[in-house]
Amino acid sequence: MSLLAYLAFLLLLGVVAQWSAWRMKLPSILLLLILGFALSHFTGMRIDNYLKDESSLLSLVGFFVAIILFEGGLTLKFSELKEAGTPVLRLCTIAVVLAFGLTAVAARYTLGYHWQICALLGAILVVTGPTVVAPLLRLIRPRRKVASIVKWEGIVVDPIGAVLAVLVFITIQEGGVGQGWDIVATALVKTLVVGMGLGWGLAKVTEGLMSRHLIPDFLESMFFLALVGVAFAGSNAIQHEAGLLAVTVLGVALANQKKVSVRHILEFKENLRVLIISLLFLMLSGRIGISEIQMVWQKGLMFLLVLILVVRPASVFLANLGSARTTFREQLFLALLAPRGIVAAAVTSVFALQITGAAKINPENETYVALAGEAGELVPLVFIVILGTVTFYGLLAAPLARRLGLSDANPTGVLFAGAEPWIRVVAKGLVEKGHHCLLLDTRFEKVSAARLDGLQAVRANILSEYAEEEIDFAGLGHLVAATPNNEVNSLAAREFQHRFGRANVWQITPSDVDFHHQKAVANHMRGRFCFLGGPRFSDLSSFVGKGAEMKSTLLTDVFTMEDFKTAHGDNAIILFTETEDGKLNPVLSEDEKIEGSITIHSLVIEQDDPETKALKKKEVSEGKSES
C-alpha cells in the first residue's frame, strides 16, 4: 500500500473512531488507540514502513504536538484564574514535584529499573496533556471551575514535564545527581529564557501586525501555522525541548491581549486538533508490536495501578492540603483524572533513542549498556500507561463527575438571551418542572423582575466577552436567542454554535423571515427557528399579554396530539418537548410529527366553551395533564 493510501485509510479510521465515540459517549482516544493497534497487528501497516528513520516521525509528531499546545494556549484566559488560580498553581508546582518523586519510586520498586531510568520515567509521566484532556472534558462537561483547573493543568504541565525530562537526562549524561549541577542550572535558565522570551516576543510581533491589518484574512491560518513552526523549531534549535514552552506561551499571550481578536483562528485550530489527534494516536499506537507489549505487560500493569491508585491521589491531596479553594469533591475528581497522551509517548521515544544511541557509541560503558536495555522497554511501557489511563479515567470520570455533582449527564437546560415578560413565564414554567434556565439581559428592570420570579438571571449582553468567559454554562444544553432585536439573535446563535453545537442553537422566528433576500439576514447567519408555527417576538409577547400560561401535557395513545390541538386550537403555542428520560428540546418552527409517549410544554390561553371543557376533562381524567 502506498503512503497516500495509508494516510487516506488513517483519515477514514479517524472519522470512524471519532463518530463512534460521539455516538457511544466514549473517549475518542480509546477507540483511536485500539484501532491503530489493530490495524498494525492484523494488516502489518505502520507508519515506519514509509519513513526512512524514526527521527523523521518524531519531528512530525513534535510539530503536531506544538500545534495542539498552541491551540490549547489560545483557550487559556487569565480571567479563569480568579477561581482556579490557586489550585492550578499548586497542581503545576507542588503536585508536579510530588508526582515526579512518587512515580520514580514506584518505577524503582515495581519495574526494578535503575534510578536513572526511574527518574526519567517520573519526569515524563508528570504530563497529562490537551490531546487527552480536551476530548475528555468535551465528554464530561464539568462545572466551569473544575473544567478550568483541568484544562490549565493539562496544557501548562506538558512543557514542564518535557523540560524536567531534559534536566534529568542531562543529569544522567553528567554521571549522576552530585555532578553537573552547573550544566543543569544553565539548561533550566536557558530553556525558560528561550521558551518564554521567544513565545512572548512572537506574540507581540503578531499582535502588532494584526492590529495594523498587515496580514490579509486569507493568509491568517497559514501565518499562524508558520508561526507555530518558527516558535517550536527555533526554540528547539537554541535549547532542546524549549519549543513546547515557547508555543504554549505564544498561545497564552495571544489569547489574553486585547488589541485584536484571535477567535476565528481558535476555531480553525480546534478543527485541526481533531484531525491531528486522530492521526497521531492511530500512527503511534500502530508502532507498538504485540511482542513488545508481552515483554512488559505484567510489570506494566502493576506500575499502572500504582500510578492511578497511589501517585495521582497522593499528589493532588497533598498539593491541596490546607487550601480552601477546592472542595473535597473537586479534589477527589482531580485525583481521578490524569490521562497521559501524545507528549508522554513522543518524549519517551526521543530519550529512549538517545540512551540507546549513547550505548552504541560507548559500548564499553556498562552503565549506558544497562540503561539502554531498560530504555528499550520504555516505549511499550508508556503505551500501556497511556492506554490504561485513558481507559480508566475515560470510563470513570464522567459518571464520577455526575455522582459528585460536578457535571450533568445530558445538559438540557436553556439559556435565554432576553428576559422579557413572555420569556419569564416560559422559564418559570420549565423551572417548576425541574429544568435549569438562565436568562441574560442588559436591562436592570428585566433582570430584577426575573429574579423576583425566582429565576436565575444575569445582567449581561449575550454578545459580550463577559458572557463568553465569566458565566458558568453548566447544565445548559440549548441557547434560545429571544431578544427583540433580530440581528442580535442571529449573531448570538452564530457565536454560540461552538459551545452548544449547531443543532442546539435556536432563535425565535425573525420578523424579516418572509422578506426579499435583499433585506433578510442570510440563513447561514442564523440559528434554527424554534417553537411550533414560528411565532415572532410580537406574537409571543401578545400571547402572554392575553393571559397565556405554561402548561405541560403528556401525550399518549389515549390523549394524542390531535386531541391537544382540538382542545386548544389557536390558543396554544407548543414550545418544547420532553422525552421520558427528561431530555428537553425546543420544537422546530416548521410542522413536525410529535407523537408517542412524550410531554409537550406549551403556552396556553384557557377557554371556557363546552367542547373544550369536555376535552380537558378527558385530559385530566386520564391523568395525562401536568399543569
Image (spheres, rainbow, N blue to C red):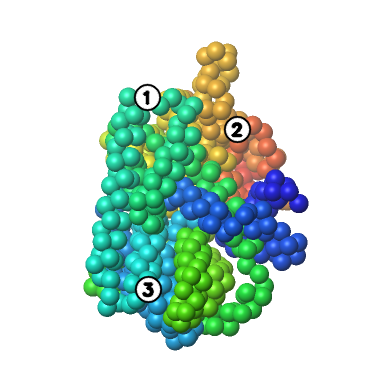
Residue name at image x 48 percent, y 63 percent: 350
Q: Describe the element under mark 2 as helix, strand or loop.
A: loop
Is residue 472 found left or right of 535 in the rendered image? left
Q: Mark 2 sits on what residue?
A: 589
Assess whether mark 1 and mark 3 are in contact (beta carbons under 8 angstroms).
Answer: no
Q: Describe the element under mark 1 as helix, strand or loop.
A: loop
Q: Report the Cα–Cα distance between label 3 and label 1.
A: 48 Å
Q: Describe the element under mark 3 as helix, strand or loop.
A: helix
Image quadrant where residue 405 sits: bottom left
Question: Which amino acid, mark 1?
Answer: Leu
In the image, residue 442 above or below residue 135: above
Q: Mark 3 sits on what residue?
A: 172
Q: Residues within 10 Å of mark 1 (few under 14, many from 20)?
A: few
Counting residues from the start of the chain, the first of labels 1 and 2 encountered is 1
Q: Which is in the foreground here, disc 1 or disc 2?
A: 1
In the image, residue 265 above or below residue 486: below
Q: Report the Cα–Cα distance between label 2 and label 3.
A: 68 Å
Counting residues from the start of the chain, the first of labels 2 and 3 encountered is 3
Residue name at image x 39 percent, y 52 percent: 236
Question: Which amino acid, mark 3?
Answer: Ile
Q: Residues within 10 Å of mark 3 (few under 14, many from 20)?
A: many
Which is nearer the eye, 245 or 60?
A: 60
Q: Which mark is residue 214?
A: 1
Which is nearer the eye, 497 or 546?
A: 497
Which is nearer the eye, 183 or 293?
A: 183
Q: Position of residue 572 (x, y in %)?
A: 57, 35
Residue name at image x 27 percent, y 52 percent: 193
Question: Which amino acid, mark 2?
Answer: Ser
Q: Position of residue 462 (x, y in %)?
A: 38, 36
